[in-house]
Amino acid sequence: NAGVTQTPKFQVLKTGQSMTLQCAQDMNHEYMSWYRQDPGMGLRLIHYSVGAGITDQGEVPNGYNVSRSTTEDFPLRLLSAAPSQTSVYFCASSSPAGSIYEQYFGPGTRLTVT
Amino acid sequence: AQKVTQAQTEISVVEKEDVTLDCVYETRDTTYYLFWYKQPPSGELVFLIRRNSFDEQNEISGRYSWNFQKSTSSFNFTITASQVVDSAVYFCALRGKGGSEKLVFGKGTKLTVNP
């Protein structure tokens, strides 16, 4: 199993550009989520999904869109990048939805918006 | 609302010292789950432990131990005989039972172990 994979590892965008951060897991996990990590802020939940076709907002959803068409993939879209979105983004998954098991995290994507 | 407070932003110790990382949480759920994650300089998040609210037994894993006290809403993490490889940012996290999968993280404690 590859676990949770994220691409790209690094990305530099200009203000106003759009892009999609990819996240995939091969563990058949129902629950997937996106966090952003900023210095001194810990990890904050952006969006999450409890299964294919179901998504919901987390703590800091503005400026981001998600969709979940398959169990494996949970892409995060930045519609119009802003410098405030400079951060490290982590994708996570766990199963089954509603379980108490720990979330498995991907290696992260470091995004810089200039 | 759920909240996790890690009051220690940074801690620096000398190798072989014992160190305790504090974690205080707030939740209205009667059933909840507490976690500790380690983030080494390489950046990945490594799961360390999960604790259920109805299990207050302390846990020891090698040089790591965890002290869970519901009376003080604390879930502290102690590293005994610290080593340079323990240098990392450590996060405490909380998940409630109320149907939400959301993990709420503390802001983390950066531990530096000097040789």
Image (cartoon, coloured by chain):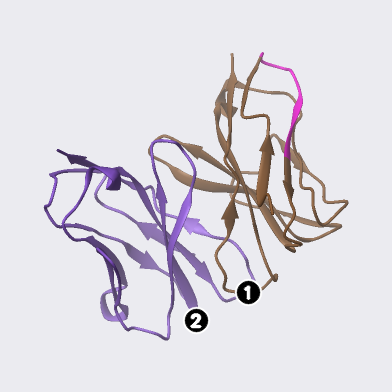
Chain colours: A brown, B purple
Q: Which mark is residue A99?
A: 1
Spatial CA distance of label 1 from label 2 is: 12 Å
Same chain for mark 1 and mark 2? The answer is: no
Residue at far bottom of view: B54
Q: Indicate the amino acid at tag 1.
A: Ser
In the rendered image, residue B31, in percent from the top left (x then y), is placed at 49, 81
Q: What stretch is highlighted in magenta?
A: A14-22
Mark 2 lies on residue: B31
Q: In which quarter of the image is the N terminus of chain A?
A: bottom right
Q: Indicate the amino acid at tag 2.
A: Thr
At x 69%, y 55%, the residue is A32
- Which chain is indicated by disc 2? B
Tell which of A62 and B21 is nearer to you: B21
Q: In this view, does B85 lie to the left or right of A72?
A: left
Q: Is residue B18 left or right of residue A107?
A: left
In the rendered image, residue B32, in percent from the top left (x then y), is placed at 49, 76
In the rendered image, residue B12, in percent from the top left (x then y), is placed at 17, 42
> Which mark lies nearer to you, 1 or 2?
1
Q: Quadrant of the C terminus of chain A?
A: top right
